[in-house]
Amino acid sequence: MKVVIIGGGAGGLPTASNIRKLDKDIEITVITRDNYIAYSPCAIPYVLGQTIKSFDDIVMKTPEDYKENNIDVLINSEVSEIDHEKKELTYTNEGQVKTMEYDKLVLATGGNSFVPPITGSDLDGVFKIRNLNDGKNVQEWVKNCKNVVVTGAGLIGIEIAYAFKELGLNVILNEMLPQIVPKSLDPDMASIVTEYLEDEGINVILGKPITKISGEDKVTGVVIDNEEEYPADMVILATGVRPELELAKMIGCEIGKWAILVDESMKTTVEDVYAVGDCVESYDAILQSNTISQLGTTAVRQAKTCAQTIAGKKSKFYPVLNSMVTKVGKLEFGAVGLTTHFAEQNNIKTISQKVEAFTRARYYPNAKPMDIKVICDADGKIIGCQIIAEERVAERIDTMTLAITEGLDCFDLSNVEFAYAPPVSMVTDPLVLAVEEVSKKFN
């Protein structure tokens, strides 16, 4: 059997590696337009801010490494046509047009950076950051910059803005919505992170879109909300990602509201065609409807399921909760499940509580404040959690992910046993404090 995987990101390459773990005889070829593979795009901001010394440090494997495992990875290659009746595809490799046959096809085409319709978005000095080459181009351009504007205050936008602040630049972080990270944080929690960014010297401008990027050949400034113009030597468009669906549509895969429809084994609606990563829709565990989960962790889990399916094993990709965590400077923040705003948009009545606690026993040296918000539905079932602190956020988000997955309510979690020692936690864990407080709002 020959498997061809189109795309070499967090969905494509792990699919190849997992197939090989399960079957030594399947012929595997990965086709990717990138010249770098097996790296984490999530690490790019930390290289730009010099927390990680070099882009070379975030490249984990080369095509030669995969070849040793009997996996062919064709870099600088792009598929232009697929004839699924013949099970043959056409691709360009190093300027030559070639064809390849397959038995099973995996679409791991990912997504493309969304470029909003802003005048001047095509000027030199305006960048998207989607892959390692983008990061290298930005790293080179920023050497001659003093003023930088980042538009889009999702995770990547915030991380990049902070990276430029670390380089000593004047940084504006712009978001057209009235808060940062609107998909993951409620306004009261987002304001804590915003205040931290502003205290660190980043000018955060919310609720106003960039309406023009100024300049002749290269960028010189931005106009925000058709009002004030700000100087800019570089503009970063961190305005989101749209699934890449052209090849899926070419062979007749059914497309949902946003992306390719797959079942729980990662099969598309076309026989012998599978899909993973940013180009597919996932199933939301709380809303019980399809959603987009463009996270590296989601892609890697889907890749494992897809590989097991192709290798003839029974496998199932479970619904998602879109848990996330990041670290900006000293501050960590994370979230899982629904925000109150998004829950109410979907006609879910919420009862929530925000509490302040400490990451360690309050008397222990260097105990840090921790803000926790727990969100429940009208029956007390936990449907969301948001945490901000300078340490130990990720493990608590993971705990809440498991609690929501298991359908626990706030009363259940308040009686769960947690480990304790003064250097690492309070005797009553901050999560327990939070669910105890929200429990008081129920009879």
Image (cartoon, rainbow, N blue to C red):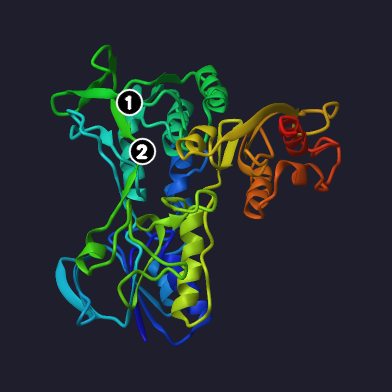
Left-right relation of 120 to 320: left
Question: Where does residue 328 sit, x and y in percent of width and height?
Answer: 54, 33
Q: Which residue is mark 2?
A: 139
- Visible in this render: residue 374? yes
For the point 23% across and 23% down, the residue is 211
Camera-nearest residue between 27 and 405:
405
Residue 255, image x and y in percent? 29, 59
Q: Position of residue 298 (x, y in %)?
A: 49, 56
Q: How many marks?
A: 2
Q: What residue is rendered at 47% in x and 29% in y?
A: 162
> Residue at label 1?
145
Q: Is residue 213 left or right of residue 433?
A: left
Q: Is residue 77 visible?
A: no
Q: Which residue, as the protein is rendered here, is positioned at the far top?
A: 228
Q: Is residue 110 left or right of residue 404?
A: left
Quadrant into which the C terminus falls:
top right
- Amino acid carrying mark 2 in the image: Gln
